[in-house]
Image (spheres, helix red, strand yellow):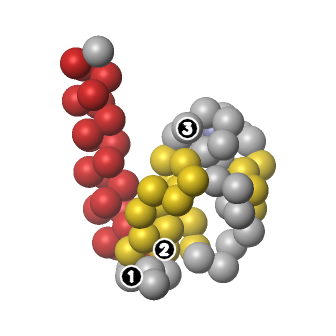
Amino acid sequence: MGATLIVKCTQCGGLMLTAVRQKTKICPYCGTHVNLLLAQKVAAADTALEASEMLRKLKSEQKLNHKKT
Ligand SMILES: [Zn+2]
């Protein structure tokens, strides 16, 4: 299993990085205390660097999707 997760904010749906062992995290977008046990896990990576690369890709894909709709 990866050491770093990409999770979706339960409130605004924003993507953020978190360590596997972390249980809560404050969303950088809306400031919500996100319960990581309830949050949707989008992806996992072995290193924080890998995770941030994945996050960047996911974000650019999201932008593309927004353009289409
Ligand atoms: Zn949020």
Is residue 43 in view? yes
**Among the 4 quarters of the image, the one containing residue 18:** bottom right
x, y percent for residue 29: 59, 37
Residue at disc 3, CB closer than 8 Å to ligand 1: yes
For the residues bearing labels 2 and 1, Cβ distance under 8 angstroms: yes
Q: Is residue 50 above or below residue 27?
A: below
* 21 to the left or right of 67: right
Query: Residue at (58%, 74%) from the top-left corner?
Result: 19
**Residue that carries the numbered disc 1 in the rendered image:** 46
Q: Amino acid at mark 2?
A: Thr
x, y percent for residue 36: 68, 60
The residues bearing labels 2 and 1 have C-alpha atoms spaced at a distance of 6 Å
**Residue that carries the numbered disc 3 in the rendered image:** 13
Q: Badge 1: few (under 14), some or many (20 or more) residues near its Cα, within 10 Å?
A: few
For the residues bearing labels 3 and 1, Cβ distance under 8 angstroms: no
Q: Amino acid at mark 3?
A: Gly
x, y percent for residue 51: 38, 67
Q: Badge 2: few (under 14), some or many (20 or more) residues near its Cα, within 10 Å?
A: many
Q: Earlier in the sequence, mark 2 or mark 1?
A: 2
Query: Residue at (74%, 68%) from the top-left corner?
Result: 23
Query: Residue at (26%, 40%) from the top-left corner?
Result: 60
Query: Residue at (26%, 39%) from the top-left corner?
Result: 61
Q: Amino acid at mark 1?
A: Asp
